[in-house]
Image: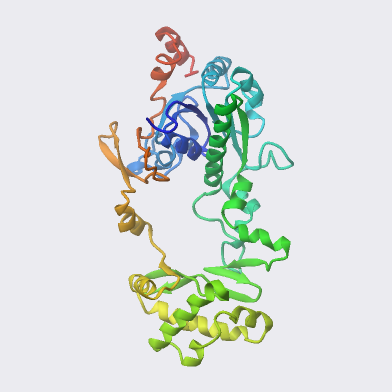
């Protein structure tokens, strides 16, 4: 028995919302991924296993569709919509990510389905929400990251902003949608009354990525773009530093909370001969105020930054981590993908999960559960489904279609 095992989810999302259904599936819900005949467009997103472009070998698809079953259904045709309504009448959740108004235009909007199933939790994921002047705007990850604020900080300070290489906007929205779905479901179980959960990716991005940037309109110093760090006023503050074999993240800042760590670092650098005693003994708590008032010139901070940089550049990432652990510095290596996969920390927590793909005759390593539950641990019950893998199981075994009715729907291209 898993936490959500009595409940059924209909997942109509595109690549915008796949993660939401996977979270509910990981928690034990019966998630039915409803795809158009031939398979969802997300199946055509690479990379592909062994570089073979095929709808059942997309690593992107695999990343967000475990613990789901797959059926195919054309909801743009009357017979498909009728079948979908039968499924929705007995479902607990519906997740969709069409453009605002598209589901209602099909007669499958929240009001339409709530009339059939008043307890249904209907989750909509979109770029800017279901209403407002931007509701119908284009919805690419780049657009949402720009509209949400964080794109302002990515890139070099003397060039235009650049996008993050891995799309993230809808992952934040999907996580918010899962939380919203669970809260609404709790209310549905309590009162018998379902509701719509309307998630806007722009708001999810603004909340999750860089809430600090939102402080500028309230009078805070504006944060500006800088490669490997941030600009605060006239001060360039590095957050990424070179190491002998890569890069590290190091917090070298001031004030009561962070200045004590800078002070410890400078004492260590003096011991190692990287700076003199006068540099070591600066007031690292008050230095931020001194720089802001002009009592300490910014050129002096830049001189110290070069001292710290010469120290990090002369050691490997492992050596710097050891120094940090021994002396209490705010410093950690920036890991490569290979280092993440081989991480002893993740291995000790049995993070990576091997899932059997019987259609391939091999096992594939997957990222592990999003959280550990002591009483009802997450289990990977199903590998990501192949296209329409569970059509007969759902339509004939659970909805009660006869074999002849099922074949007729297949021949018409509805299933």
Q: Residue furthest left?
A: 361
The quarter of the picture where residue 158 lies is: bottom right
| Percent of width and height locating residue 208 | 57, 52
Q: Please tell me which residue lies in front, 172 or 264.
A: 264
| Percent of width and height locating residue 106 | 63, 23
Coloration mode: rainbow
| Percent of width and height locating residue 167 | 52, 49
Seen at 54% across and 19% down, the residue is 84
Q: How many marks?
A: 0
Identify the image quadrant of the N terminus: top left
108 relative to 252, above or below: above
Q: Please tell me which residue lies in front, 231 or 161.
A: 231
Answer whether residue 304 is visible to the viewer in this image. Answer: yes
Answer whether residue 16 is visible to the viewer in this image. Answer: no
Q: Decide if residue 357 is on the left or right side of residue 74.
A: left
2 relative to 149, above or below: above
376 relative to 72, above or below: below
Seen at 35% across and 33% down, the residue is 381
The quarter of the picture where residue 407 lies is: top left
Q: Please tell me which residue lies in front, 312 or 226.
A: 312
The quarter of the picture where residue 123 lies is: top right
| Percent of width and height locating residue 398 | 42, 16
Seen at 30% across and 53% down, the residue is 347
Q: Decide if residue 413 is on the left or right side of residue 341.
A: right
């Amino acid at each position: 028995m898993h936490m959500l095992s009595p409940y059924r989810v209909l997942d109509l999302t595109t690549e915008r919302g796949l993660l939401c259904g996977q979270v509910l599936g990981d928690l034990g819900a019966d998630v039915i991924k409803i795809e158009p005949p031939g398979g969802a467009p997300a199946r055509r997103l690479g990379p592909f296993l062994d570089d073979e472009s095929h709808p059942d070998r997309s690593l992107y698809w695999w990343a967000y569709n475990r613990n789901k079953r797959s059926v195919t259904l054309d909801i743009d045709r009357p017979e498909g919509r009728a079948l979908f309504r039968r499924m929705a009448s007995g479902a607990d959740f519906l997740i969709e990510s069409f453009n605002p108004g598209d589901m209602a235009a099909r007669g499958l909007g929240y009001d339409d389905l709530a009339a059939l199933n008043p307890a249904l939790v209907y989750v909509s994921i979109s770029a800017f929400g279901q209403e407002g002047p931007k509701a119908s705007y284009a919805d690419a990850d780049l657009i949402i990251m720009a509209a949400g604020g964080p794109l302002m900080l990515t890139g070099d300070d003397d060039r235009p902003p650049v996008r993050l290489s891995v799309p993230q906007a809808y992952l934040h929205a999907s996580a918010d949608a899962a939380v919203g779905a669970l809260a609404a479901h709790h209310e549905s179980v309590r009162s018998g009354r379902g509701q719509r959960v309307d998630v806007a990716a722009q708001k999810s991005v603004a909340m999750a990525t860089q809430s600090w940037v939102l402080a500028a309109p309230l009078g805070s110093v504006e944060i500006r773009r800088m490669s490997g760090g941030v600009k605060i006023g006239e001060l360039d503050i590095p957050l990424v530093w070179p190491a002998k074999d890569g890069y590290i993240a190091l917090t070298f800042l001031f004030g009561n909370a962070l200045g004590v760590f800078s002070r410890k670092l400078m004492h260590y650098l003096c011991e190692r001969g990287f700076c003199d005693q006068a540099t070591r003994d600066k007031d690292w708590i008050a230095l931020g105020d001194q720089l802001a008032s002009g009592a300490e010139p910014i050129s002096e901070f830049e001189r110290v930054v070069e001292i710290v940089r010469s120290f990090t550049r002369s050691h490997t990432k492992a050596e710097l981590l050891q120094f940090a652990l021994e002396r209490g510095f705010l410093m950690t290596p920036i890991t490569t993908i290979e280092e993440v996969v081989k991480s002893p920390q993740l291995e000790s927590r049995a993070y990576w999960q091997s899932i059997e793909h019987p259609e391939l005759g091999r096992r594939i390593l997957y990222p592990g559960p999003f959280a550990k539950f002591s009483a009802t641990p997450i289990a990977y019950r199903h590998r990501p489904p192949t296209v329409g893998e569970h059509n007969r199981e759902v339509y004939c075994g659970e909805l009660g279609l006869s074999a002849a009715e099922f074949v007729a729907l297949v021949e018409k291209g509805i299933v």
